[in-house]
Amino acid sequence: MATIATLKKGQRGIIREFSVDTVPLKLLEMGCLPGNEVALVQTAPFQDPLYLTVNGAHLAIRKETASQIQIDVITEQKSSPEGI
């Protein structure tokens, strides 16, 4: 199960689900909702908090909260040159 906390710097994912009881209302208001894209921009020196973008908005959230939000990781597919 992938969560926001398992993302590596530069990786992106689509928010799948989470428990409304464990995620602060402020994150929901800022667009941290199922179906929205999230990307890990950077982590603090001790890996907490995490600096993210969610649909273009920049957020910093605690790793504990990030581990409660399940995602589907977006894998980048490299395209091959034409004619090969």
Image (spheres, grey):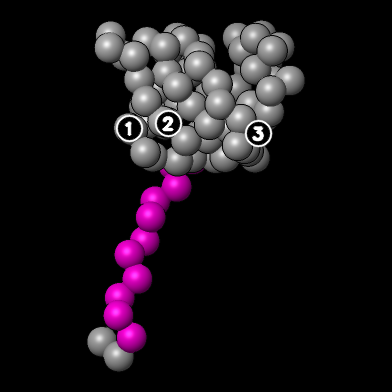
Q: Residue furthest right?
A: 29
Disc 2, disc 3: CB below 8 Å? no
Q: Which residue is mark 3?
A: 34
Q: Main secondary structure of the magenta part?
A: loop
Query: Is residue 68 shown left or right of residue 21?
Result: left
Tell me the distance, in whole angstroms, between the alpha carbons under discs 1 and 3: 20 Å
Tell me the distance, in whole angstroms, between the alpha carbons under discs 2 and 3: 16 Å
Disc 1, disc 2: CB below 8 Å? yes
Does the rendering let one see residue 82?
yes
What residue type is disc 1 on?
Lys
Residue interval drawn in magenta: 72-82
Does the rendering let one see residue 17?
no
In the picture shown, does residue 83 fall above or below 8?
Answer: below
Q: Residue furthest bottom?
A: 83
Q: Inspect the magenta stretch and tell me whether residue 80 lies in it.
A: yes
Residue name at image x 45 percent, y 47 percent:
74
Query: Is residue 22 shown left or right of residue 83?
Result: right
Q: Which residue is mark 1?
A: 8
